[in-house]
């Protein structure tokens, strides 16, 4: 940057000193008509383009050019690339005697440049660059080093009273992308330009953007400032932006500040944005937006950049809306092949303020509370950045679907993106207190998840669990329905497998969970003191590599619809399959079809203990206790093969002092097609009342009679109410 400014300084000084003498020489030696012919020939020969101008005037104080035009490749028949209505330079002669170049006016009016990128990806100025390279032999003259530059006439002062650009237009058309961009009506002026003393500048312009599916209204810009080149001492040079404004319909942005020391630029900028609402944003949104209006957004930026070291220090970057804000600081090193950085970010969000922004759409949610965060991030050798920090929830509240969350308090602690956990989070949901915590870690390829949840009462009366069941196929008319019914009678209905063996495996995880809900009430499941404990390793979508245990217990409740409860989750389906098979067994044995015709299960206690390993589920126990019977189930279930090998023991009534004396049922087959068999020998030694001295025929008859009564009582567990 410093070398560039000094090189430009040398050119300006040399041109200004020579300008006075050159004016007279050019006027007498090269009349305008001759210069025009020479220029046209040179441009045509070397660039295959045409130039033209209406007039060229020389006098002792300057030169003026009017009606300048520069064609596209091949000549004016293909269009005009650059045009200018007027260019003028006026120099004051007397100050030249004192080694001062005082330019009264440098001006350019009605500049028009058309840049085109063709469908083949080439620009309409590529040929100019190529021909210019040929003329220079492929090498541009190297600028002087600073040591040589010091020998140039730096003692000559250059001052310009008036420098201006009036009504300039630059357009860009991308034929391949179908995009047009233009800077129009650009005006720029400098008053009392001086290399040694501060001077003022101001300007304005408008931009137009047209995309294939959208055309934006003009964006208007205006700016004013003050610059001090400090005799080209870049350390002391500065530019102050008194005001920069941009506007688009209701949107308005303003910016002010100062940039100093161009060897190591230091920038302090402040700004504001107003007028962002749904009507403005709707132009850019693919769908209808709800009504909203953002408050004034305040911006602040304080940076220090080293051009030699290729580093930037962001002392502060802040965006704020009312009491909500994001404030960051950072150190950035972009001198190495891989970007290096470290940053600190503080966040504070008021949910009530967020709701006020979109009152019409968010008022019903009754948002309350605040979210605060303190995040530290840094580049790292791994794919993920090094991130640490915490996010705190304070008195969070929300209302949705008639359910209310209140007084949610807690924090998320981030040790890294692979190590995130919460402290104990507390809150109130529908008047019921709860606590929960979650920890996630991924030290290698496998995730480790620990979860705990404890709640007083959970009530959901209006969940449509029926929607979880597979929808029946649509039919067209009675004939189609009759045909479908006939087909269904001929072919057994296909049931969804317990485990999808063709599904993507997904990432494996080790999961530990402890869940306790002291009372649950909804339309398919009522219970008290529900507890679930999970400890499974290598859990993925296919379950064939998973190993671990699942234990649960629940007291004094009723399962109102077992099939719908199983449909709510794949894991509920697996956990309750043994109970479902028992239910089917009572029906299949048909010992009392009148009493067994439903799927309600009332109980005083249900306990389950399962071991998962190698794609198989060992049923250590699934025990159900009620006033009518005690049912104990053990065995195994192949999660992949779905093979069943289970034994069900059903004790009549409550288990008393005489001990556990069950009816025994063996269950085989598969989960989709189980088979059932009454174990006569095992039942004989149990509660069916066979005498030790009775004959085999008498014992067999006693088994049948007592088994019928036992199943009749057990069937009452499943009777619809």
Image (spheres, grey):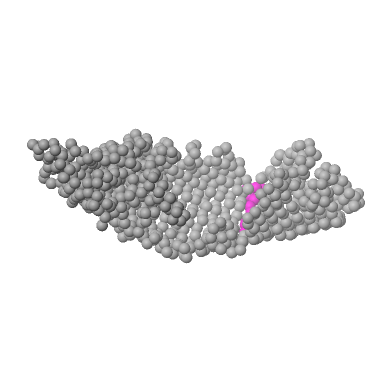
- From this viewpoint, which residue is outermost toward the top? 614
Q: How many marks?
A: 0
**Residue 12 image offset from top left, x and y in percent:** 76, 49
**Residue 319 image offset from top left, x and y in percent:** 51, 56
State which quarter of the image contains the N terminus.
Answer: top right
Viewer-nearest residue: 238 or 457: 457
**Relative to 311, residue 431 above or below:** below
**Residue 609 image offset from top left, x and y in percent:** 26, 41
State which quarter of the image contains the C terminus.
Answer: bottom left
**Relative to 402, residue 624 above or below:** above
Q: Residue at x 79, y 47 (%)?
A: 73
**Relative to 676, residue 173 above or below:** below
- From this viewpoint, which residue is outermost toward the left? 693
Please say whether residue 341 is visible from this viewpoint: yes
Q: Residue at x 32, y 39 (%)?
A: 670
Viewer-nearest residue: 273 or 512: 512
Q: Which residues are magenta?
A: 232-244
Viewer-nearest residue: 603 or 79: 603
Q: Residue at x 24, y 39 (%)?
A: 677
Please say whether residue 429 is visible from this viewpoint: no
**Relative to 3, residue 481 above or below:** below
- Tell me if residue 236 is in the magenta stretch: yes
In this rendering, would 287 be left or right of 92? left
Viewer-nearest residue: 359 or 154: 359
- Tell me if residue 161 is in the magenta stretch: no
In the figure, residue 681 lies in which quadrant? top left
**Residue 369 image offset from top left, x and y in percent:** 40, 59
In this rendering, would 290 be left or right of 46? left
Q: Residue at x 49, y 51 (%)?
A: 328
């Amino acid at each position: 940057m410093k070398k560039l400014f000094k090189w430009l300084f040398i050119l300006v000084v040399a041109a200004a000193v020579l300008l006075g003498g050159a004016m007279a020489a050019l006027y007498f030696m090269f009349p305008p008509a001759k210069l025009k012919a020479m220029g046209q020939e040179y441009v045509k020969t070397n660039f295959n383009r045409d130039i033209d101008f209406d007039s060229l005037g020389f006098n002792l104080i300057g030169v003026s050019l009017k009606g300048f035009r520069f064609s596209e490749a091949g000549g004016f028949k293909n269009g005009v690339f650059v045009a200018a209505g007027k260019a003028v330079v006026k120099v004051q002669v007397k100050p030249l005697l004192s080694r001062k170049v005082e330019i009264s006016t440098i001006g350019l009016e009605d500049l028009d440049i058309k840049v085109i990128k063709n469908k083949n990806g080439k620009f309409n100025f590529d040929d100019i660059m190529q021909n210019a390279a040929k003329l220079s032999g492929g090498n541009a003259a190297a600028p002087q080093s600073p040591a040589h530059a010091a020998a140039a006439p730096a003692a000559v002062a250059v001052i310009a009273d008036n420098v201006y650009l009036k009504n300039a237009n630059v357009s860009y058309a991308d034929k391949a992308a179908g995009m047009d961009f233009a800077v129009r009506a650009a005006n720029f002026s400098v008053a009392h330009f001086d290399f040694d003393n501060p001077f003022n500048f101001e300007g304005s312009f408008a931009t137009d953007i047209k995309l294939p599916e959208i055309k934006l209204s003009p964006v208007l810009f205006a700016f004013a400032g003050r610059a001090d080149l400090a005799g080209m001492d870049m350390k002391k040079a500065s530019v102050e932006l008194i005001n920069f404004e941009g506007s688009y319909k209701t949107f308005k942005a303003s910016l002010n500040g100062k940039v100093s020391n161009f060897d190591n630029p230091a920038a302090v900028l402040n700004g504001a944005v107003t007028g962002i609402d749904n009507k403005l944003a709707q132009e850019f949104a693919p769908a209808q937006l709800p009504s909203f209006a953002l408050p004034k957004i305040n911006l602040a930026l304080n940076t220090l950049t080293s051009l030699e070291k290729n580093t930037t220090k962001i002392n502060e970057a802040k965006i704020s809306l009312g009491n909500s804000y994001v404030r960051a600081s950072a150190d950035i090193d972009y001198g190495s092949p891989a970007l290096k950085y470290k940053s600190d970010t503080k966040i504070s969000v008021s949910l009530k303020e967020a709701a006020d922004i979109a009152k019409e759409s968010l008022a019903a949610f009754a948002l309350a509370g605040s979210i605060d965060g303190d995040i530290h991030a840094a580049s790292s050798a791994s794919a993920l950045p090094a991130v640490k920090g915490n996010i705190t929830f304070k008195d969070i509240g929300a209302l949705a679907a008639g359910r209310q969350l209140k007084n949610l308090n807690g924090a998320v602690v981030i040790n890294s993106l692979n190590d995130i956990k919460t402290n104990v989070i507390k809150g109130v949901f529908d008047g019921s207190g709860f606590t929960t915590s979650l920890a996630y870690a991924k030290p290698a390829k496998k995730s480790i998840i620990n979860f705990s949840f404890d709640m007083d009462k959970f009530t959901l009366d209006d969940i449509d669990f029926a929607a979880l069941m597979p929808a029946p196929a649509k039919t067209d008319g009675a004939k189609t329905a009759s045909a479908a019914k006939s087909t269904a009678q001929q072919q057994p209905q296909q049931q969804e497998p317990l485990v999808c063996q063709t599904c993507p495996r997904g990432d494996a995880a080790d999961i530990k969970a402890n869940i306790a809900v002291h009372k649950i009430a909804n339309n398919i499941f009522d219970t008290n003191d529900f507890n679930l404990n999970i400890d499974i390793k290598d859990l993925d979508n296919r379950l064939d590599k998973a190993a671990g245990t699942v234990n649960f217990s629940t007291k004094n409740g009723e399962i109102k619809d077992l099939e719908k409860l199983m449909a709510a989750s794949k894991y509920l389906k697996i956990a309750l399959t043994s109970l479902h098979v028992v239910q089917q067994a009572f029906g299949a044995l048909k010992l009392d079809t009148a009493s067994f015709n439903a799927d309600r299960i009332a109980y005083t206690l249900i306990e389950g203990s399962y071991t998962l390993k190698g794609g198989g589920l060992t049923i250590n126990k699934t025990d159900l206790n009620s006033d009518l019977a005690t049912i104990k189930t053990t065995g195994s279930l192949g999660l992949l093969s779905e093979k069943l090998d289970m034994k069900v023991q059903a004790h009549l009534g409550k288990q008393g002092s005489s001990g556990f004396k069950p009816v025994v049922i063996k269950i085989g087959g598969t989960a989709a097609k189980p088979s059932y068999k009454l174990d006569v020998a095992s039942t004989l030694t149990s509660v069916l009342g066979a005498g030790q001295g009775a004959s085999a025929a008498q014992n067999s008859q006693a088994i049948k009679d007592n088994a019928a009564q036992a199943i009749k009582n057990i069937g009452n567990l499943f009777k619809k109410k």
